[in-house]
Every structure is written in C-alpha cells, then in structure tokens.
Amino acid sequence: MSSLDRRALILGGSTAALTLALAGCADTGTPAPVAAAPAAVRSSAPVAITGLEPKYSALYGEVTTEPHPVPAIKASILKPAFVRKLVPYETKEPPGTIVIDPHAHYLYFVQADGMALRYGVGVGREGFAWKGEAVIKTKQEWPDWYPPKEMIDRTPGMAEKLDTLQSGIGMHGGAGNPLGARAMYLWQGNKDTLFRIHGTTEPKSIGTSASSGCIRMINQDAIDLYGRVPEGTRVVVL
C-alpha cells in the first residue's frame, strides 16, 4: 500500500482514530516553499555538534527568541535515552540523510565518520505507522494546521477553534498548534505524503507510538533539526 493510500485509509478511520489525530499532524494544507533561513537570522540557533555533551538545560531550556513561547522541558518529562545526543551510528546512508527508526523511537541525522545526531521522537501507533523514503520538499516555522473535514465534523468543539486561513479551514501557527514550532513536509516525487516531521505540544509523547503517523519532536529538537537540514534532504523511515 502506498503512503497516499495508507493516509487515505487513516483519514477515513473511526472517530477515535480521528480524535487521536488531533495530537498528530493530519494536515492537508501545503505551504509555499520556504527556504532555510541563514544562520545569522534564524530565530533560534541550533546547538553545535561537538565532542562535548551540552548540558540538559542548554538543550531544553526555555527559548526566548521565538515569536511564540517555547517553555523549558523538565528533565522528569523526557527520558534520558531520548535526549539529543551525538552517537556512533552504522549505516550505508550518506551524511546529510535523515534515518528514522520508529521501533526505537529515534531520528538520526547522519554525520561523517560513522556518527549521527540522534533525537528522540514520537511515531505513529499501530495501524498508523509507515515506512519508505521521501524528501523534505518544504519547511515552515510555526506552521498552520489544517485538520481534515472528517475530523472537524466528528470532534465536538473543534470547529469553534478553527479559522478560515489561506489554504482552508485550520488553526494558525502558535503555541497551542499541534504541529509545534517547526514542520518539515515529506514528499515522494510530486506527491505530498501528508506526513511531516514536526514539533509537538505534548512532550510526554516522545518515545511512544501515539501519533497518526507523523514524526513528533520536542519543540527544541524540531527547531534544532530544522536549522540543520535543507529542503531536498532525503528521509528514510525503516
């Protein structure tokens, strides 16, 4: 089954599945291409990859340079295994590739010399997971969210929280938006898979299989990865 067919099946699922997707990324809007900002003007510079492990507070402290609040992540929320870290990683994929291991709940940004920058992620629950290859065609800071009509119709009170936006009925980007601070939109050829790598308003979901198929990241991690990867980056989901 193709990613698009699988996504269509997801969107036509039960009320419970659609309600769950509210915390995921059932986003049917496609933004205009947004080039990665130069390092000098990015709203939040990523933590450098070095041989020295930065302190937890440096990775997940409050971000004050964004247009919307990005609160600090308490150490009690994120398990140590899912803290951003430079690790040895054996792969045939070339540097610059993103490799996602949904079973381990890790996203690897492959580096040179057998290393990778590893992030903890949340992934799709059983029946909502996917695998294959895609590329990041577009990127968006504080993206708008466009839930499918089926979700709006079946979720009490959702319609009152949505507005008419440029690409349809949706939610403006912001602190309460399920896509979080950043979104990277995954395409296969000329087709939008409707899957994204994005931030989350639910940091406790990192390390779990709870989304409607997208790859969730702590907002601080989503900001960091966004600043490192250009459009056209290849993404491999194991």
Image: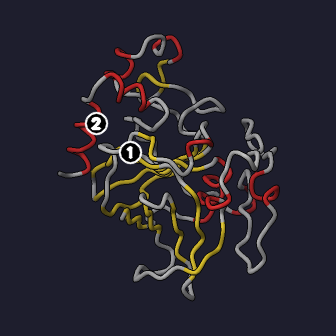
Q: Which mark is residue 110?
A: none
Q: Describe residue 143's horizontal placement relative to residue 138 as left or right.
A: right
Q: Residue at x 61, y 59 (%)?
A: 82
Q: Nearer the viewer, residue 31 or 213?
A: 213
Report which residue position mark 1 lands on: 213
The image shows residue 107, relative to residue 26, as above or below, that is below
Dot 2 falls on a residue whose secondary structure is helix
Q: Mark 1 or mark 2, which has the lower sequence index?
A: 2
Q: Residue at x 50, y 47 (%)?
A: 208
Q: CA distance from mark 1 to mark 2?
A: 9 Å
Report which residue position mark 2 lands on: 10
The image shows residue 2, relative to residue 148, as above or below, that is below
Q: Residue at x 42, y 30 (%)?
A: 20
Q: Amino acid at mark 1?
A: Gly
Q: Position of residue 166 (x, y in %)?
A: 46, 28
Q: Nearer the viewer, residue 182 or 100?
A: 100
Q: Position of residue 27 (x, y in %)?
A: 41, 36
Q: Amino acid at mark 2?
A: Ile
Q: Residue furthest left?
A: 1
Q: Position of residue 216 (x, y in %)?
A: 52, 47
Q: Residue at x 50, y 18 (%)?
A: 162
Picture quadrant where residue 127 is located = top left
Q: Position of residue 3 (x, y in %)?
A: 26, 50
Picture quadrant where residue 46 is located = bottom right
The image shows residue 96, relative to residue 225, as above or below, that is below
Asked if labels 2 and 1 touch by Cβ distance under 8 angstroms, the answer is yes
Q: Residues within 10 Å of mark 2 (few under 14, many from 20)?
A: some
User: Which part of the image, by quadrant, shows the C terminus?
Assistant: bottom left
The image shows residue 140, relative to residue 145, as above or below, that is below
